[in-house]
Amino acid sequence: MSVDVIKTDAVIIGAGPVGLFAVFELGLLDVKAHVIDILDRPGGQCAELYPEKPIYDIPALPVVTGQELTDQLMEQIAPFGAELHFNERVESIQRTEDGFRLETDAGTPFECKVIVIAAGGGSFTPKRPPLPGIEDYENTSVFYSVRKMDAFRDRDVLIVGGGDSALDWTLNLQPVAKSLTLLHRRSEFRAAPASVQKMMDLVDSGNISFKLGQVATLHGDNGRLTGVTVKGPDGTTFEQPTEVMLPFFGLTMKLGPVANWGLNLEENLIPVDTEKFETSEKGIFAIGDINTYPGKLKLILSGFHEAALMAQAAHRIIYPDKKLIFQYTTSSSNLQKKLGVK
Amino acid sequence: MARITFIQPDGTENTVEAEPGMTVMEAAVKNSVRGIAAECGGACSCATCHVYVEDDWRQATGEPEAMEEDMLDFAFDVRPESRLSCQIKVTSELDGLRVRIPEKQF
């Protein structure tokens, strides 16, 4: 079965503040955009790393949290109706006769004229505990996410961690698994109190077990885990047999597939010019934290500026015959119409 | 001015000078000390600036606050002497501080 190709003017990779603002700047110039992000919500680092932390250097906003900034940007770009695709990561980019074809890890194909990489520090990926040999067990016995609960049916499952992901999957997998053990380094949890209570109830009723400690060594062979050695809080160790381990230690940023797209890179950053913020490939732009140029500052406000200049260049590619007249949103009835205020 | 020594897992040491008021993480990043990733830039949100404070200095650096202790759940091989270096403020009392960098921040 072939999947319908999504055709658009621009694909923006990354729904952080800079990717979102790119929707706005492109939209003012009649460039339609789709946005793709690996996270399940907009905001990028502002959503994942510091939703509640105040930011003090956004012009005209003396103080704003990462979440507030994201919410305000979503409101600001609403008139342009850009579609946002979450939980997907762009895996491949191919040049076509009149633009590009992209495909995500979920297999969604896109065709567009320009690509805007606003991927910040790269894509958020689950942290891999630095245990020797863990890669040999990944996707056979060690999993960082749950795609199908049925994969854990009637198996001995060990969940490691004390955050919401660890607690949520403990509660969800308990009815499915043969046995479930939750392992955490301390008896406090940074998770929703209701989930913690439910987990404790399951411990009390003997449906799961909770153990204190940290995984020190993995045991098994041929990609099949048989157990782990756990270091307890008092420094003593014990053996915990298990077939499956799910470690939940949060997310980290990795450059990811960007490295495979044939772009020039400098220390995991994409060099761009400072007129158009175009990469070594014509039609592919890079804005925000992921780019580099002489004097680059990794500030949200720099990314906003880069988005505005990028949009001018993107417009020239999409409308080669149209002369672009510079206009202000304060006075242009044409722009105000696009913003839905006139 | 306070001197801070970062000890790599292989035993090599970097001693850097830090201004009071900055954090131990900032002192490491400013001096390109290996092994301090500090992905979130000091917001206590990522646990990639994890260090082990040497015993003699644990009293001077103090205990982690609740938010930092929560964040340490996302670090690996956490020990009683674990701290997130973005949460240790440099003071003149910390002149001579010694911290160990874990094998990997993840």
Image (cartoon, rainbow, N blue to C red):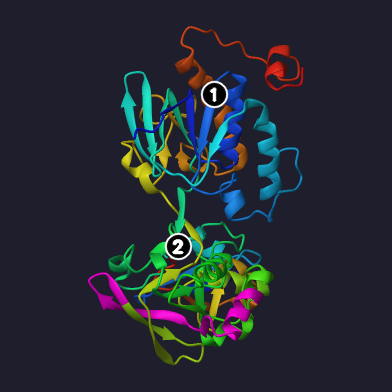
* Circle 2 Cα neighbour tier, 10 Å, few/some/many (<14 / 14–19 / ≥20): few
- Labels 2 and 1 share a subunit: yes
**For the image shown, how many numbered marks are present on the structure?**
2
In space, the residues marked 2 and 1 are separated at their CA atoms by: 38 Å
Between A143 and A56, the one lying in front of the other is A143
Q: Is residue B60 above or below residue A23?
A: below
Instruction: Tell me residue A24's x, y (percent).
Output: 62, 28
Residue A2 can be seen, yes or no: yes
Mark 2: which amino acid?
Met
Can residue A199 be found in the magenta stretch? Answer: yes
Residue A144 visible? The answer is no
Judging by the rendered image, the residue that carries numbered circle 2 is: A149
From which residue to which does the magenta span run? A197-225
Which image quadrant is residue A4 in?
top left
Q: Earlier in the sequence, mark 2 or mark 1?
A: 1
Residue B27 percent across, percent down from the top left = 54, 64
* Depicted A185 relative to depicted A92: above or below: below
Q: Nearer the viewer, residue A256 or A111?
A: A111
Residue for badge 1? A32
Q: Nearer the viewer, residue A278 or A69?
A: A69
Q: Considering the image in quadrants, where does the N terminus of chain A appear?
A: top left
Q: Is residue B25 left or right of residue A231?
A: right
Task: Give me the chain letter of mark 1.
Answer: A
Which residue appears at 57% of the width and 24% of the height? A26
Q: Secondary structure at mark 2?
A: helix
Q: Chain of mark 2?
A: A
- Tell whether A154 sits left or right of B43: left
Q: Give, as a three-letter code, the residue at label 1.
A: Lys
